[in-house]
Amino acid sequence: MTRLDRAEALRLLGSVSLGRIVFTERALPAVRPVNHVMDGGDIIVRLHDGASLAAIVAPTNASGVVVAYEADVIDPVSHLGWSVVVTGYARRVTDEGLLARYAEQLIPWAACPPMNGALRIRPDLVTGARLTV
């Protein structure tokens, strides 16, 4: 296993559209698979009514909440690939222009209510590893 530097870890994160967000729900850790896009160095995740994620960040909470985000590509046979974990603050996106742009980019993989919001995760701690022979 070799460590990835921040730039390479974020580049790899941007090469996939699916990851897992880790957050606190009723004082317990919760994990949800979500799709994402990168906007600069930030991770953007879609929100919709009824989702657990929609409740974690109130629009008035300017400081945001701490979350972790993980994505990987690991071959199930060879076990080679990479994994990236980001920890940072998630804040609700409020700019209507950005929300419209993200709605076009964040196409869900399963039937769900229309996107009505987005989270911006600003990476503070970025760790990654390449799994090699």
Image (cartoon, rainbow, N blue to C red):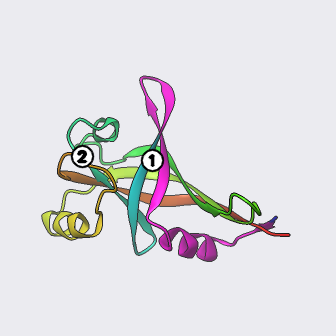
Q: How many marks?
A: 2
- Element class at badge 2: loop
Which residue lies under the disc numbered 2? 112
Amino acid found under the numbered disc labelled 2: Cys
Apparent side of residue 59 relative to residue 70 in the rendered image (left or right): left
Asked which quadrant contains residue 133, the reply is: bottom right
Amino acid found under the numbered disc labelled 1: Pro
Q: Residues within 10 Å of mark 1 (few under 14, many from 20)?
A: few
Q: Which residues are magenta?
A: 2-31
61 or 116: nearer the eye?
A: 116
Which label was assigned to residue 33?
A: 1
Q: Residues within 10 Å of mark 2 (few under 14, many from 20)?
A: few
Give yes or no for residue 14 being in the magenta stretch: yes
User: Do labels 2 and 1 touch, CB within 8 Å?
Assistant: no
Give yes or no for residue 131 being in the magenta stretch: no
Q: Residue at x 71, y 70 (%)?
A: 4
- Element class at badge 1: strand
Q: CA distance from mark 2 to mark 1?
A: 13 Å
Q: Position of residue 39 (x, y in %)?
A: 37, 72
